[in-house]
Image (cartoon, rainbow, N blue to C red):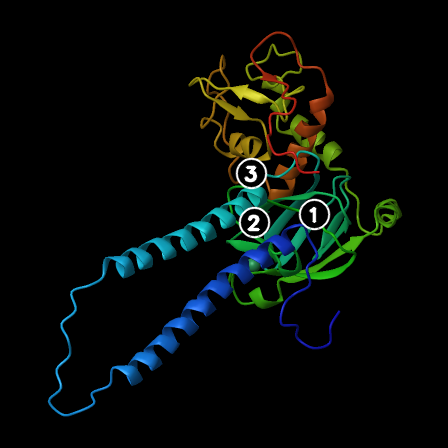
């Protein structure tokens, strides 16, 4: 950690060098033209000054070469900025498939994070270096924003849905994260530290279980029974709702003929707005659980449905078909 304020945060993720290079490119172009235009103004001020009283300037009606140049050159430069920016952005928006998935809940004014094994942390995140990490983020109240300057990533955390964010830490150490969307009185203290560890240290840390471990799959299974989900989502596929065995991560055929990937966002939406995307072959019978589940309970249910991914899907009924390699990004 630096004692004085650094001009630039450290480069600690796969995105940092890309974002910085693009930024330097854009700043260099802006500085170049700002200097060139200023110098031209000063030079012309001197060169074309009025040399005697009553002097009249020559009427100029334009120059095609000049006109073309100042259309084409900025167009090419602006398109280059756009294309480069799009490449970085698309990479940022499409997570690879081999990610370590961390659940993040923002609330006034703290961050709750959950490791894949259920270990929970507050305002702290431990991740192994060199591993692709995906954050699946929801909010309990207002809009927050998860931002890690050293990783050059940030993403709004919006109530009512999940947003995701991915990165691959390239350096061990501690890096500050912040809420970067003004969210009320104590917004400024809503932050914490990402600790990037060597993979074996991370494994040791996980098994050391310094935090509280509530097994989200077990909690989810209990909720699934308590809230009578099982009554319709029978595992053999003969219920009034689709079986959730082997459901998660697959492509789901919907009643309107379209398909959707059974990801966290889809399950969340199905809990709170069940009629939005009905699975083909089923009736819109499911009640909404809006206001009846906390964000944590929602994540527990998702963890449970996720754990059923390994179960063989029933052959009867319309369900999800397993999708091997449907995501196209293949970042190591
Ligand atoms: Cu906030």
Precedes in sequence: disc 1 or disc 2: 2
Asked whether the viewer can see residue 163, the reply is no
Nearer to me, 317 or 202: 202
Precedes in sequence: disc 2 or disc 3: 2
- The alpha-carbon separation of the residues under discs 1 and 3 comes to 35 Å
- The alpha-carbon separation of the residues under discs 1 and 2 comes to 27 Å
Q: Please name which of the two marks, 1 or 3, marks the residue nearer to the observer.
A: 1
User: What secondary structure is found at the residue carrying circle 2?
Assistant: loop
Q: In the picture provided, is 285 more to the left or to the right than 186?
A: left
Q: Residue at x 63, y 51 (%)?
A: 15
Nearer to me, 112 or 59: 59
Which residue in the structure is indicated by mark 1?
Answer: 168
Which quadrant is the N terminus positioned in? bottom right
Q: Which mark is residue 292?
A: 3
Image coordinates of residue 154 in percent, x first then y, are 57, 54
User: What secondary structure is found at the residue carrying circle 3?
Assistant: loop
Which residue in the structure is indicated by mark 2?
Answer: 140
Q: Residue at x 20, y 87 (%)?
A: 50
Q: Please name which of the two marks, 2 or 3, marks the residue nearer to the observer.
A: 2
Q: Which mark is residue 54?
A: none
| Residue 116 placement: quadrant | top right
Image coordinates of residue 127 in percent, x first then y, are 76, 49
């Amino acid at each position: 950690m630096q004692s004085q304020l650094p001009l630039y945060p450290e480069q600690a993720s796969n995105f940092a060098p890309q974002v910085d290079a693009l930024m330097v490119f854009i700043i260099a172009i802006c500085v170049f033209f700002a200097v060139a235009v200023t110098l031209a103004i000063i030079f012309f001020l001197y060169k074309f000054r009025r040399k005697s009283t009553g002097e009249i300037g020559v009427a100029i009606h334009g120059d095609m070469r000049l006109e073309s140049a100042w259309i084409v050159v900025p167009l090419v430069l602006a398109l280059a900025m756009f294309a480069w920016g799009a490449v970085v952005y698309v990479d940022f928006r499409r997570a690879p498939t081999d990610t370590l998935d961390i659940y993040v809940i923002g609330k006034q004014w703290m961050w709750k994070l959950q490791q894949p094994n259920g270990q929970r942390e507050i305002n702290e995140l431990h991740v192994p270096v060199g591993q692709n990490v995906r954050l699946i983020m929801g909010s309990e109240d207002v809009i927050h924003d998860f931002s890690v300057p050293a990783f050059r990533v940030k993403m709004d955390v919006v109530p009512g849905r999940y947003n995701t964010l991915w990165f691959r830490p390239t350096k061990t150490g501690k890096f500050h994260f912040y809420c970067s969307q003004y969210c009320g009185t104590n917004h400024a203290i809503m932050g914490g530290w990402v600790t990037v560890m060597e993979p074996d240290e991370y494994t040791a840390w996980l098994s050391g279980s310094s935090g509280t471990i509530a097994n989200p799959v077990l909690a989810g299974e209990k909720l699934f029974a308590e809230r009578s989900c099982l009554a319709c989502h029978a595992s053999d596929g003969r219920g009034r709702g689709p079986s959730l065995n082997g459901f998660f991560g697959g492509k789901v055929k919907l009643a309107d003929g379209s398909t959707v990937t059974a990801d966290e966002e889809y399950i969340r939406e199905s809990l709170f707005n069940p009629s939005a995307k009905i699975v083909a072959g089923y009736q819109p019978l499911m009640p909404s659980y809006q206001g009846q589940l906390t964000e944590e309970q929602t994540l527990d249910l998702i963890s449970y449905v996720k754990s059923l991914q390994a179960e063989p899907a029933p052959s009867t009924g319309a369900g999800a078909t397993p999708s091997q390699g449907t995501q196209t990004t293949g970042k190591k």
